[in-house]
């Protein structure tokens, strides 16, 4: 059980991704309030997916959801795993994505990099001079064009599969109320959309409840853990006044490290 002055984490990750982090954080003495701000809705694979997938030389997964949803979609086609070609290599955006690929046992490229972000990935030797190679980006709807443009610049024939979309989830009113009463509240935003959806939720509270204590203004004063400097810059530009902690790696362990840092600096 958490101490009265312990950190309270508002875990906005999708429901299927939240459980492991909750166990880690609670074991470290952090109270966790799970309130997903995003729901993941799988989309259909291209009709020719089962036959054309093995033709791709490089497959880049932009998120852990991209890995799990692709696996699920191929299973619905009666295949235990995506049919990789003999020379296929998988690449990850994000440490959690890297770990998901390792867990699946898919043909993962060996890279000597510290940050699994688009810019660092594109700078690796493995993704230079791709003339004549076919690359697949597995992702959800939206996102930055950086990766596709970078691969095309070095000669690759690039295809994108948008295999899921993110939908705003409903605010967990009970968890939010408890969070506002916490001794030391900490928000988790693993993506800009997760943060934007949370802001939209609390803004709705302000507009709906006449006795609300300006939920958005209060939120913007709290500590927040984010998954990248890009998210940090974006939310700071939009008025966040509290402390912002960027995870050392994009994973549950990275969130735990950030929580320990917050605790030490409190």
Image: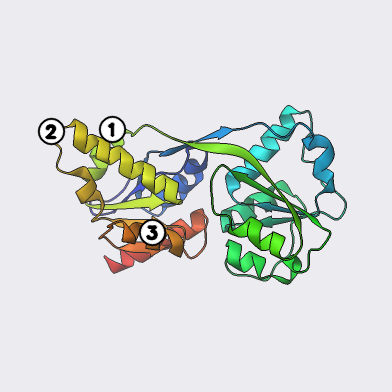
CA separation, marks 2 and 3?
Answer: 29 Å
Q: Is residue 246 above or below residue 79?
A: below
Q: CA distance from mark 3 to mark 1?
A: 26 Å
Residue 65 lies left or right of residue 36; in this view the side is right
Label total for image: 3
Q: Position of residue 36 (x, y in %)?
A: 41, 38
Q: Quadrant of residue 172?
A: top left
Q: Nearer the viewer, mark 1 or mark 2?
A: 2
Q: Residue at x 77, y 39 (%)?
A: 81
Q: Is residue 39 above or below residue 58?
A: above
Q: Which percent across, then down, holds residue 90?
A: 73, 54
> As displayed, is residue 207 above or below residue 184?
above
Q: Of the residues under marks 2 and 3, which one precedes in the sequence?
A: 2
Residue that carries the numbered disc 2 in the rendered image = 210
Helix, strand or loop for disc 3: helix
User: Label for residue 234?
Assistant: 3
For label 1, the SS is helix
261 or 214, which is in the foreground?
Answer: 214
Residue 144: image location, x then y, percent = 54, 54
User: How far is the residue under mark 1 from the one under mark 2?
Assistant: 16 Å
Say which of marks 2 and 3 sits in front: 3
Question: In the rendered structure, which disc, 3 or 1, sits on the residue that comes first in sequence?
Answer: 1
The tag on residue 173 is 1
Give the colour scheme of this rendering. Answer: rainbow
Dividing the picture into quarters, in which one does residue 127 lie?
bottom right
On the picture, is 171 further left or further right than 192? left
**Image quadrant of residue 214?**
top left
- For the residue pair 215 and 188, the one nearer the viewer reads as 215
């Amino acid at each position: 059980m958490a101490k009265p002055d312990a950190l309270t984490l508002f875990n906005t990750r999708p429901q299927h991704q939240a459980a492991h982090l909750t166990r880690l954080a609670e074991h470290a003495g952090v109270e966790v309030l799970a309130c997903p701000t995003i729901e993941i809705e799988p989309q259909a694979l291209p009709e020719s997916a089962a036959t054309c997938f093995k033709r791709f030389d490089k497959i880049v997964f932009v998120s852990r959801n991209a890995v799990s949803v692709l696996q699920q979609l191929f299973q619905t086609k009666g295949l235990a795993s995506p049919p990789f070609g003999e020379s296929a290599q998988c690449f990850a955006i994000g440490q959690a994505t890297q770990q998901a690929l390792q867990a699946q046992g898919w043909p993962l490229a060996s890279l000597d990099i510290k940050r699994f972000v688009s810019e660092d990935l594109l700078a690796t030797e493995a993704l230079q001079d791709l003339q004549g190679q076919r690359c697949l980006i597995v992702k959800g709807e939206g996102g930055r064009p950086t990766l596709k443009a970078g691969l095309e610049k070095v000669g690759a024939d690039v295809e994108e599969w948008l295999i899921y979309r993110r939908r705003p989830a409903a605010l967990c009113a009970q968890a939010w109320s408890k969070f506002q009463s916490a001794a030391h509240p900490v928000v988790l935003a693993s993506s800009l959309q997760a943060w934007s959806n949370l802001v939209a939720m609390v803004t709705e509270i302000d507009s709906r409840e006449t006795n609300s204590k300006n939920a958005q203004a209060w939120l913007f004063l709290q500590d927040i853990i984010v998954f990248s400097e890009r998210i940090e810059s974006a939310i700071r530009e939009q008025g966040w006044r509290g402390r912002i902690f960027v995870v050392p790696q994009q994973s549950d362990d990275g969130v735990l490290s950030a929580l320990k840092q917050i605790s030490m600096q409190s």
